[in-house]
Image (tube, rainbow, N blue to C red):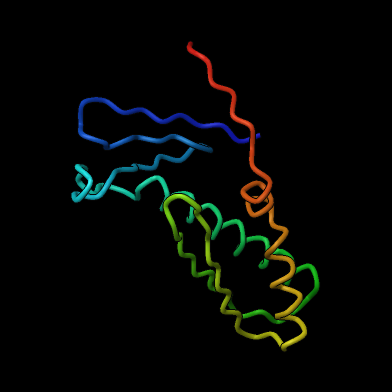
Amino acid sequence: MAQGTARIGNDHYRTEISVGGHAITADEPAALGGRGAGPAPYDLLLASLGACTAITLRMYADRKGWPMESVEVALRLHGKDERRIDRVLTIAGLDDEQMARMADIAERTPVTLTLKNGLPIDTRLA
């Protein structure tokens, strides 16, 4: 299954992440004391949801042999106390019935289900 590490030193909020053999830098924007050297944590969360949605829909269209040209997943995080994500799919190359099916599939992507269902997190000291 997936695994990764995140390491921060004295460089204010810049965090080096290693996941799946890839290096990612995360940071906070200057307005929050960072330097904007990379996406902020909630930006990475949206990126994960967007990537999972786009990849799942591409896989589904390919499996069905549908002529999908592209899919764009626009995401916006709202709220502070009660958070919610708006997701808008822009799909090119499919008819209305196929696009409706894709919207239904988007509601059941792995990351979507994880976020909707919650995920236990066990924390311990090394």
Residue at the extreme front of the image, as rendered = 81
x, y percentage for residue 30?
19, 49
Q: Image check: 48 left or right of 1?
A: left
Pick the front one: 12 or 70: 12
Give the answer, above or below, for where 28 lies relative to 70. Answer: above
Q: As drawn, is 113 to the left or to the right of 22?
A: right
* Nearest to the observer: residue 113 or residue 60: 113
Q: Residue at x 56, y 32 (%)?
A: 3
Residue at 48%, 55% (x, y): give it. Answer: 46
Residue drawn where x is 46% and y is 29% of the image: 5
Residue lying at 70% horizontally and 80% vertically, measured from the top left? 99
Number of numbered tags placed on the structure image: 0
Q: In front here: 22 or 123?
A: 123
**Where the N terminus falls, by quadrant?**
top right
Q: Position of residue 97 (x, y in %)?
A: 77, 85
Residue 123, by quadrant, is top right
Q: Up-down: is 60 above or below 7? A: below
* 36 horizontally vs 26: left or right: left
